[in-house]
C-alpha cells in the first residue's frame, strides 16, 4: 500500500514539468471582441495566416488583434450573403465559401468578392441543394441539385458544366454533396448513394441507406 502511494507521488512530481510544458494561453473571441455573430459555422486559416470565421451573420477575418467583418452591401464587390456555412482557403490566397445563397469567392489581392449560383429557381433549397469542394491540386467543383456538376475555370472565372456519359447524366442531376479526397471526387446523391467520378461517368461505391 505504502509502495503504491510512493510510486503515485513520484509519478505526479515527475509529471509536473510535462504538464507545465503543455500549458498554453487561450484567447477567447466573441462579440465583445468584434465577432459579428456568436453562432460560428466554420473556421479556417488562409495562406496569409489570417483566421476566418463564417457565422450566421457575417464573415470575419482575424489577424490576432483585430477583426474585420464582411457583410452584404450595395457595392457589387461586397459579399453576397450574410450566412457563411463552409470555407475553403486556397494555397494562392483566395477563399471559396458556401453560403445560404450559392457560392462566394474572396479575392484577397483586391479585397473583393464574386458570387456564383445565386439566381437559381424558386424551388431551389440553397441550404441543401448546392455543394462545393476544393483542393489545390484538383481544383474547384460545385454541384447544383437538378442541374448537374460544374468545374471552375480559373482563366474564364466561371463554372462550366461537366458532361457525363448518358447512363451517368441522371446521377449528375441528383447530387447533394461533393468531396475531394486524394484527388478523387466523391458524391452523395439524394437517394443515399456514394458515387465516385471517374472520367465522364459515375461509379457507385456503396449505398448509404
Image (spheres, rainbow, N blue to C red):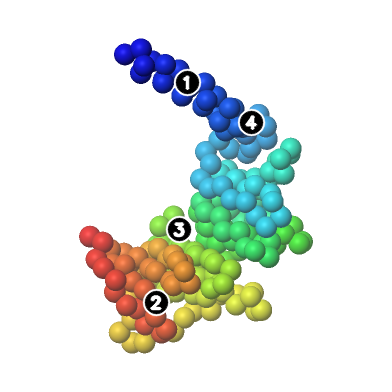
From the viewer's perspective, is residue 140 above or below residue 163? above
Residue corresponding to mark 2: 197
User: From mark 3 to mark 2, how far is it between C-alphas?
Assistant: 23 Å
State the mark number for residue 126: 3
Residue corresponding to mark 1: 10
Of the two numbered discs 1 and 4 on the same chain, state the one appearing first in sequence: 1
Looking at the image, can residue 122 be seen? no
User: From mark 2 to mark 1, how far is it between C-alphas?
Assistant: 58 Å
Cβ atoms at labels 1 and 3 below 8 Å apart: no
Q: Secondary structure at mark 1?
A: helix
Of the two numbered discs 3 and 4 on the same chain, state the one appearing first in sequence: 4
Of the two numbered discs 2 and 1 on the same chain, state the one appearing first in sequence: 1
- Please state if 32 lies on the left or on the right of 38 as rendered: right
User: From mark 1 to mark 3, how far is it between C-alphas?
Assistant: 59 Å
Residue corresponding to mark 4: 25
Density class for disc 4 (Cα within 10 Å; few <14, some 14-19, many ≥20) is: few
Q: Closer to the camera: disc 1 or disc 4?
A: 1
Amino acid at each position: 500500500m505504502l509502495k503504491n502511494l510512493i510510486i503515485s507521488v513520484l509519478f505526479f512530481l515527475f509529471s509536473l514539468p510535462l504538464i507545465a510544458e503543455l500549458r498554453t494561453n487561450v484567447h477567447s473571441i466573441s462579440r465583445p471582441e468584434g465577432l459579428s455573430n456568436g453562432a460560428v459555422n466554420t473556421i479556417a486559416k488562409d495562406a496569409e495566416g489570417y483566421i476566418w470565421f463564417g457565422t450566421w451573420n457575417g464573415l470575419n477575418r482575424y489577424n490576432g488583434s483585430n477583426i474585420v467583418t464582411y457583410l452584404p452591401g450595395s457595392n457589387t464587390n461586397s459579399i453576397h450573403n450574410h450566412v457563411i456555412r463552409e470555407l475553403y482557403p486556397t494555397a494562392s490566397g483566395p477563399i471559396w465559401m458556401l453560403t445560404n445563397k450559392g457560392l462566394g469567392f474572396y479575392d484577397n489581392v483586391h479585397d473583393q468578392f464574386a458570387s456564383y449560383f445565386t439566381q437559381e429557381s424558386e424551388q431551389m433549397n440553397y441550404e441543401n441543394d448546392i455543394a462545393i469542394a476544393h483542393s489545390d491540386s484538383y481544383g474547384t467543383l460545385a454541384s447544383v441539385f437538378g442541374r448537374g456538376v460544374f468545374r471552375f475555370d480559373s482563366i474564364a472565372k466561371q463554372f462550366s458544366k461537366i458532361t457525363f456519359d448518358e447512363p451517368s447524366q441522371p446521377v449528375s442531376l441528383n447530387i447533394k454533396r461533393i468531396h475531394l479526397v486524394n484527388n478523387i471526387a466523391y458524391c452523395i446523391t439524394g437517394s443515399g448513394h456514394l458515387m465516385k467520378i471517374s472520367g465522364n461517368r459515375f461509379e457507385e461505391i456503396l449505398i448509404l441507406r
